[in-house]
Structure formats: C-alpha cells, structure tokens
Image (spheres, helix red, strand yellow):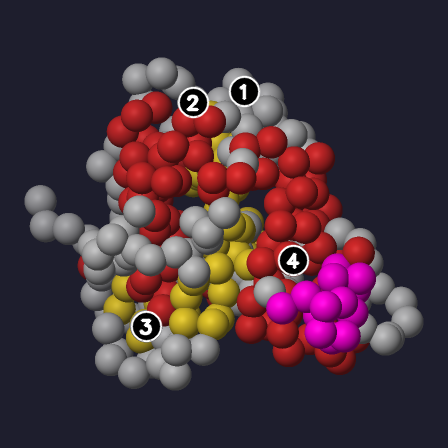
Amino acid sequence: MAESPYLSSQADGLLARESGPWVAEKLTYLKRYIEVFETSMKDKWADRSYIDLFSGPGKCIDRKSSQTHLGSPLIALTTKYPFTAYYFVDAVEANVNALKKRCSASPLYDRVNARVGDANTEVVALVEEVRRTPSLNLAFLDPEGLELHWQTVAELALVDKMDLIIHYPQMGLSRWMPRVIDAEGTNDVDRFFGGTQWRTVFEAHRRGEEAFLHRELMDHYKANLAQLGYQEALRDDEVGIEPLMVNEKAAPLYRLLFASKHPLGIKFWRKITDKDSHGQRRLFS
C-alpha cells in the first residue's frame, strides 16, 4: 500500500508551519530519542504515551528550500514501534484541524487525542487522563517562543514516569530579559523559569560577574527540575549535552534540555546526542 501523502515528508495541500533549516536538525534529535525509547521499552511497558503540547499542524516547510518535513507529532505517530496513546495540543484551531486530517490517514488514529487550547491550561486535564493508566511517557515541549510556563512542567512531573524534552529559548530569553528585568509584575520570563531568581543571575551577568549567562540559567532550570524529582538532570557528567540550534548566521537560537527520573533515560539521551544531526560526533558547547 502506498504511503499516504498526509503521513510523508511532502506537501499535501494542508496547513504547514513555516520554519528555518534548524527545525529539521532539532527534529532529528527527537526522532532518534523516540526510536531508542520505543525500541527499548515496547516489550517492557504495555502502555506508553507521547505528549506534544505545542504540536502545530503536523508538518513544517523550510522557508528557504521549500522542503517539507514531518513535524513532531507525525514523527511520533509514524515511528517503527508506535506509542499506545498520543496527546496533541495546540492553541490554534486551524493547526489542530490540519493535524487531525493528517492523523486520520494513520491506522493508529484511534490512539490520537488532539485538542485546541492553551497548553498551560490543558495540561491539567491531560495529566489527569494519563495518570489513570500506569504508563511510560515522553513529553515534547517545543513552543515557538516563551509560551511554556514552569507550572506546566511541574504539572507533567506529577506523572511518575515522564521523560521531558524541553525547548530552552536562548535567543528569546536574551532579547526579553533586558526588557523586563526592571519591570514590575510577572512577565513571560518569570513564568518560564517559575519565579524571579533568574533576575539575580542576569544582574550578575550585567555587572560582569558571570560570563556564561545561559550556562548558569540552564543550571538554575535543571536545579528546579531536580526539585520535581528529576535528579538525573543535575548529574555533573551531563553538562554540555543540550544540543544547540543556530540560525543561518550561526547565532544561537535555542537548546534542547532533557530530564528523566531514571538513569536509563539519561543513557538514551547521551546516546542520541553523541553525534550531531548529520551523524558527526558532536563537540559539546
């Protein structure tokens, strides 16, 4: 049977998210992790859920090359050993409609739960659903900007077996922190970090006392993950395995942070980040 155009890396007439070439690189790491995760766990856990809180329409198109790529939800849906449940959320109804149409071409469509809504609100009901059945879970948290709130991460952490791949918006933070550091009230940076302690780190950097701003901020974020039970996030030998995506001018855009409550998850992540998206052994930065 020919593969449906809805489930393949080709234009299909439906809405697609415009992106840069770095998106394909990012999705390579996700695809690798899903493959290792599912290959290793499919015979050990009867129920395995994939959660994508900023799913988009399911495909993206490189604005420069016009090449179409499967987005994160379809990568998860079309993997060799599929999950037993899929939860997709997006704030834009048109995105969800396009994603549902694409997913409907899959024989696994009955496993798909796609909903329109703010991820930071929908996560509460979603976690309640996931916790009804003992399962092994992977959440991909990849907004386009600073939309991810720390409270959403904390909510997901209520699920005992929940690996996290988190978008760390390095460029977005660099742009917004100077604008809001002296502002009153809660802002998007506060909501991302779950408080105002980031301001202390930023102020030290602004005074010239801290040269490696984002290293310090990521370590702060990981320390907060540890408070949620992700002790593996703080391992000293894991510093530097946050793949960095850059734009055409080699300017840092964002990183992928990983967290697992089990050392096996870290082992998997080390395995898939040992080489860059082109298969070359990666130099940590």
Label 2, secondary structure: give it: loop
Q: Is residue 59 visible?
A: no
Q: Which residue is mark 3?
A: 21
What kind of residue is marked 3? Pro
As drawn, the residue found furthest toward the left would be 1
Looking at the rendering, the stretch of residues picked out in magenta corresponds to 198-211
Instruction: Indicate the quadrant containing the C terminus: top left, top right, bottom left or bottom right.
Output: bottom left
Q: From the viewer's perspective, is the residue at label 1 or at label 3 nearer? A: 3
Ranked by sequence position, the earlier of labels 1 and 2 is 2
What kind of residue is marked 1? Thr
Residue drawn at x 58%, y 38% is 234
Q: Which residue is mark 4?
A: 217
As drawn, 113 above or below 18 = above
As drawn, 105 above or below 111 = below
Checking the image for residue 47, the label placed there is 2
Crowdedness near tag 1: few (<14), some (14–19) or many (≥20) residues, C-alpha within 10 Å: few
